[in-house]
Amino acid sequence: MATGVSLAPKRHSMACAKVVLAYSGGLDTSVAIPWLREEKGLDVVAVTVDVGQPVDLDRVRDKALRSGAVAALAADARQEFAEEFVLPALRANALYEGVYPLSTALARPLIGRHLVEVARRERASFVAHGCTGKGNDQVRFELSTTGLAPELGVIAPAREWTMTREEEIAYAARHGIEVEATRRSPYSTDENLWGRSIECGILEDPAVEPPEEVYLWTVSPGEAPPGPEYLTVGFEHGAPVSVDGRELSAVRLIDELNRRAGAHGVGRIDHLESRVVGIKSREVYECPAATVLLRAHQALEGLVLPRDVLSFKRHVEQRYAELIYDGLWFSPLRSALEAFVTETQQRITGEVAVKLYRGSATVAGRRSSQSLYQAGLATYSHGDQFRREMAEGFIYVWGLPSRTWAKVGETAAPEALAPAERAP
C-alpha cells in the first residue's frame, strides 16, 4: 500500500490492526493515541527514540500506556545516532544551503528505521507520526518508511484532524491524558545530540533579530568569557575520536564540545531556509559541536586531500546535504555518495586546534602524518626543494589551449563565405 493514505475507521475495526506511532510524549502524539483507536480502529504501539533530546524514557513510556497504547517501547539510540548518522554527515561536511548542519533532519531517518523495525516485529500494518502538513519532517518520516518498508501505510493524525490546540487540550482532558502545559510557548523547538532548532513566534519576521530568550545552549557572544579557549580535536579516518588528547566516544565527544563551545557563544545560526514543501521559513539553530567539528574536519581535509578530490567532493557534499534535508537518507544515490565519501576519508587522520572566542570557532592549527603540505616545497627560505626551472615548461604546456585559441582568433580573416552553388 502506498504511504500517506487516508484510512477509513471501519476498515480496521474488525481486524484490530496495529499502528506504530512515533511518540514524543507531547500533546500531539499523546492525543494521537486515543484518536487512532477511536477514528481508525487501530491498536497503537508507541515508540520513543532518544537521540539526545531531554526525555525520561520510563516516564514517557508510562504516559503512553496510560493514554491508551497497547504497548510502549523506548530506545536509547544516542550512540546509534552519533555513529551511523551524525558521523557520516560530518565526513561529508553536510551543510544544507551551506549553513545548516542538519541536526533535526538527521534524526528522522533513524527514528523512521526504529518505527519500521517495530512494525515488522509487531506485524503492524501502519506507522504514524505527529507532523502537520506544512513542515519537512512529514516528508522525512514517510520517505524513510517508503525506502525501508514500502508495504507499510503511513497515517498523519495532525494532518487529518481539524482540532485547534485548545480543542486538543480538551480532547486530552476527556480521555484522562495528562497535559503538562495549557499555555503554548511562542516557539516551536526540537533538539538532539547534533543541535537545537527554534522557530515560530517573533522569529517568523525575518527582519527581527532573534531575542536572547530563544537560546539555551549558547551564551550571548557579548557575555562570553573575555579570553579565548583553545581545544584540539583528534580525527581518525575522518571521525573525531579525541579532545585535547582524551579519547571519547562519539556521544561524549559531541556532548563536551556542545558544552565548551556553547559557553563561548559558538554555534548560533540564523537561516532563511528553503523547505521541501516549497515555502521559505526562518529557522534559528544552536549547533556548537557541529560548528567546531565541521570547521576542524574541513581544515584537516584541506591539509590531506589533493586539489581535484577536494573540488569534486564539494559538489558531492552539497548534493549529500540536500538528500538528507529532503528525506532521502534511504536512497540509492545517498548510498552511492556515501561510498565515495568513505573512500576520501582513508587518510583523514590528524589533529586540529580550534580557538573559541566570543561566538567564533577559528582553526588555529592542523597537523597530520598524511599531510600533503611539504615544507621543502612550500618554503621561500633556505631548504627550498621546488625545481623552479621546471615552471616555465609547465606554464607553456598548461596554457597551450588558451594560447592557441587566442592566436587563431586574432589571425583568422573574417572572410564572407561564397554562396553555395545551386543544383541545375
Image: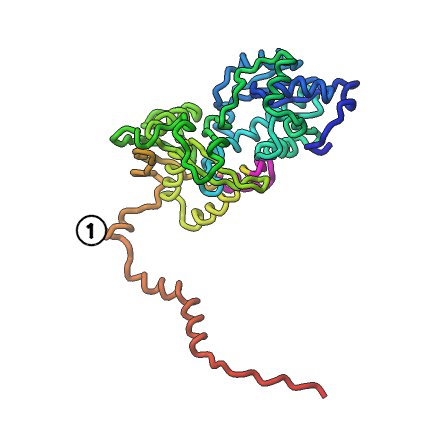
Q: Is residue 80 visible?
A: yes
Front residue of this view, candidates 378 and 43? 43
Q: Is residue 257 magenta?
A: no
Question: Which residue carries the number 1 mark?
Answer: 382
- The answer to which quarter of the image holds residue 261 is top left
- Magenta residues (range): 326-341
Task: Locate residue 423, reporting x and y percent.
Answer: 70, 86
Q: Quadrant of the N terminus?
A: top right
Q: Quadrant of the C terminus?
A: bottom right
Task: Please name the residue shown 36% across and 41% down the image.
Answer: 299
Question: Predominant secondary structure in magenta?
Answer: helix
> Which residue in the rendered view is the most extreme toward the bottom?
424
Front residue of this view, candidates 40 and 233? 40
Task: Please name the residue shown 63% across and 27% down the image.
Answer: 158
Q: Residues within 10 Å of mark 1 (few under 14, many from 20)?
A: few
Q: Secondary structure at mark 1?
A: loop
Task: Locate residue 233, reporting x and y percent.
Answer: 35, 31
Task: Please name the residue shown 34% across and 27% down the image.
Answer: 263
Q: Is residue 335 magenta?
A: yes
Front residue of this view, candidates 175 and 333? 175
Front residue of this view, candidates 128 and 229? 128
Task: Locate residue 288, reporting x and y percent.
Answer: 39, 31
Which kind of residue does numbered mark 1 sit on?
A: His
Task: Locate residue 34, reporting x and y percent.
Answer: 67, 17
**319 lies left or right of 406:** right
